[in-house]
Amino acid sequence: MIRLPERKVRSETSSAIRRTPLTLDRHEQIERLASSPVDVLVVGGGVTGCYTALDAVTRGLTVALVERDDFASGTSSKSSKMVHGGLRYIEQGNLPLVRRSLLERQRFRRNAPHLVQRLPFVFPVLAQDGLFDARIAKAFEGLLWTYDLAGGWRIGRLHQRLSVPEVLARAPRLRADRLEGGLLYYDSRTDDARLTLTIARTAAHFGATVLNGATCRGLLREGGRVRGATIEVDGRDIDVRAGVVINATGVWSDTLDALSDAGHRPRIRPAKGVHIVVPWTRLPVDGTVTVPVPGRARRATCTRWGDVVVVGTTDTDYDGSLDEVLCNGEEMQYLLDGANTAFDADLTPSDVVGSIAGLRPLVGEKEGATLDMSRDHQISTDARGLVTVTGGKLTTSRHMGELVVDEALKVLGRRARCRTVRLPLLGGAGYDAEATSATGGLGAHLGERYGTEARFVAALFTEDPSLAEPIIDGSAYLRAEVVYAARCELARTVDDVLSRRTRMRVFARDLSVKAAPEVGRLLQQELGLPDEEVTWQIDDYIAGIDREKTVLMKGLS
């Protein structure tokens, strides 16, 4: 999409550029939380809660954002990592959601170009056992035209047909004996955990108090209205007074709603989605290739991320613990079967180097398949003034935050204009993704993670040249990134760094175990952690990996 030259410098762009790093000191954030009331208290540090906090603070409200575990530690770090309109929603007849999603996709690409990149999707047309044969492919191309016209065109590319050689150039191990061609269209991808964290940091840049490891233990009431919450943080209880409390806790939202209204009826239907990660050398694809899964209605996607490929996803009902969601052997085999049916890859469980399992907070009854349930969001205010947002998807999180703050302003009796439509996230203003990636090397690595703020990470090399070295041999992540995570990104633990500030746990599970001691050492230096705390964090991280692998392999012969 071609953008016309600006006639003047936009204030939104200038306001989102820093000359010095944004350091976030945990003790300072705690004291700010305890020292004064706020207009808005957001409970839940997923992508929706973080964008709600950013929207509110940029409208001139005083804001606090609290998260029980870590930013994006729930659903928002376990998504398909796509910023997309959703072809499937057209098939379901939900064109308004597609149009909104495609508009928000473009806003993400403009406001966070370092974190949201264009991604080609290939649909192979197979003679048999495919998503569709040549006849159905013609009808599917009509769907792609609808997608393009609904807003897909904003990405700068329209869909197109591919010949067999063109498909094989992108996926050389597809079973060519059944291949009759393909269809190509474009969407976007993102590192969901870093995107969520960057939204939270941008909110902090504009003045919000943001704090992880802060649990909501109860709601405060005045005159029968919710007017704050009791927050437990680092063994201390803090009563946070607020004009309005927003429940953005995703799959946990029924729990907080019940604290406000004892008669609340649960409305969240968790749907489990899993992905597995295999080496790119075992499944060489470029972009995303969508393939059938034998005997199942849902398609599987195989998406390259550097040296690995992420294969997913499932969509099934879930009734287990919300606090421990892991991929099991049956789910892994389901995805391996899908990949092996379409590709001459002969993937086995031993090829799996990581896995992701998360819950979608769908809203609705228990009848019907989760695959067919709406991904629309719902925003409500109960009789006591608690505002709750549920459902939705990562792609529309900015818009959801806008609508939630609109609702919160009604509770406050105030009016203020939304300012996030064209507001760059930290690191996004002035970043040219194509130019940076073309340079390669360290600049490209840091650029796609920090954008224009990569210079602050690189500046740490001057402070200590050893920080320019990898955390561990075989990893692209640097020691400086651990230090930066502790100083500027509120990282508290080994798991915070390896699971979300970097993605080593997801993309290089066993290597991350070897990296854990060095991460612990660097965190100890930065945060002043006692020896026993560091030892516990390392042991706890390794135990979590062991548990993940045990569940993954359970039931396999």
Image (cartoon, rainbow, N blue to C red):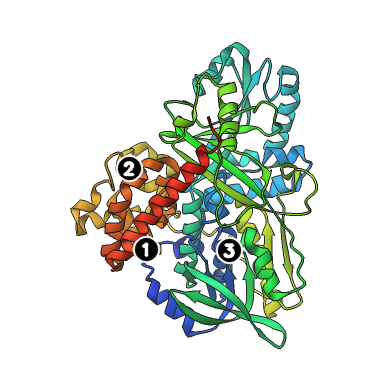
Q: In the figure, residue 128 lies in which quadrant?
A: top right
In the image, which disc is placed on residue 356? Answer: none
Q: Is residue 116 above or below residue 210?
A: above
Q: Residues within 10 Å of mark 2 (few under 14, many from 20)?
A: some
Q: In the figure, residue 507 lies in which quadrant?
A: top left
- Inter-mark Cα distance, 3 to 2: 30 Å
* Residue 497 percent across, percent down from the top left: 39, 55
Name the residue that disc number 3 marks: 49
As helix, strand or loop, the secondary structure at mark 1 comes to helix
Tell me if 67 is positioned left or right of 298 in this view. left
Name the residue that disc number 2 marks: 476
Q: Residues within 10 Å of mark 1 (few under 14, many from 20)?
A: some
Q: Residue at x 73, y 74 (%)?
A: 261
Q: Is residue 272 above or below residue 227?
A: above
Please name the amino acid that badge 2 sits on. Ala
Residues at marks 3 and 2 touching, judged by CB atoms closer than 8 Å = no
* Residue 480 percent across, percent down from the top left: 29, 54
Q: Residue at x 50, y 75 (%)?
A: 232
Which residue is more in the foreground, 445 or 374?
Answer: 374
Tell me if 269 is positioned left or right of 197 in this view. right
As helix, strand or loop, the secondary structure at mark 2 comes to loop
In the image, which disc is placed on residue 488? Answer: 1
Q: Residue at x 41, y 61 (%)?
A: 17
The disc, 3 or 2, on the residue closer to the chain's N-terminal end is 3
Which residue is more in the foreground, 440 or 381?
Answer: 381
Tell me if 39 is positioned left or right of 131 in this view. left
